[in-house]
Amino acid sequence: MNIRRRLDLLEKRLTSEPIVLQMADGRTERLSGRGDYVLNLVARACRGDRTPEMALIAQSISSSDPGGAHMIELARALLNGPEEDTQ
């Protein structure tokens, strides 16, 4: 097997690992994406986006990120943090 094909297979395996969210009622939810999906979710949390997948992250109590990272915990903290006072 040539190096190019090995790299392609490795990339597919690394980027296809889902984010597993643990919910308060004991169920789990999965979010899947490719490439910089997790980074995109964190950026959207910084902007305060409120989409169905962002709501799932905000409602979750724990998560398992691809590669053992803790980026979804950061997104959850941003989504559930204090709201900015605009007055």
Image (cartoon, helix red, strand yellow):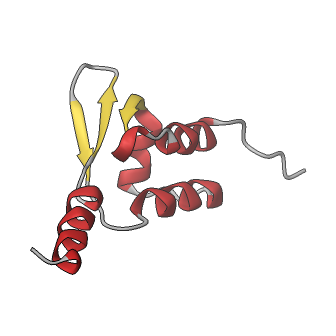
At 54% from the left and 54% from the top, the residue drawn is: 42
**Rendering coords of residue 12 (x, y %):** 21, 65
Where in the figure is residue 13, as x and y percent of width and height? 20, 58
Q: Residue furthest left?
A: 1
| Vertical position of residue 2 compared to residue 42: above or below | below
Instruction: Relative to 23, say whether 30 is above or below.
Output: below
Residue 81 located left or right of residue 6: right
Q: Residue furthest front?
A: 2
Say if residue 86 shows up in the picture.
Answer: yes
Q: Is residue 49 left or right of residue 7?
A: right
- The number of discs equals 0
User: Residue 66, image x and y in percent?
Assistant: 35, 46
Q: Is residue 85 above or below residue 21?
A: below
Q: Tell whether 41 sits left or right of 53.
A: right
Q: Identify the residue at horizontal 38%, vertical 33% (top origin).
A: 63
Residue 25, picture quadrant: top left
Quadrant of image for the N terminus: bottom left
**Residue, x 21% and y 26% (percent of image)?**
27
Residue toward you, 21 or 54:
21
Give the residue displayed 90% in from the left and 50% down from the top: 87
- Regarding residue 65, the answer to whether it shows in the image is no
Residue 83 image point, x, y percent: 72, 42
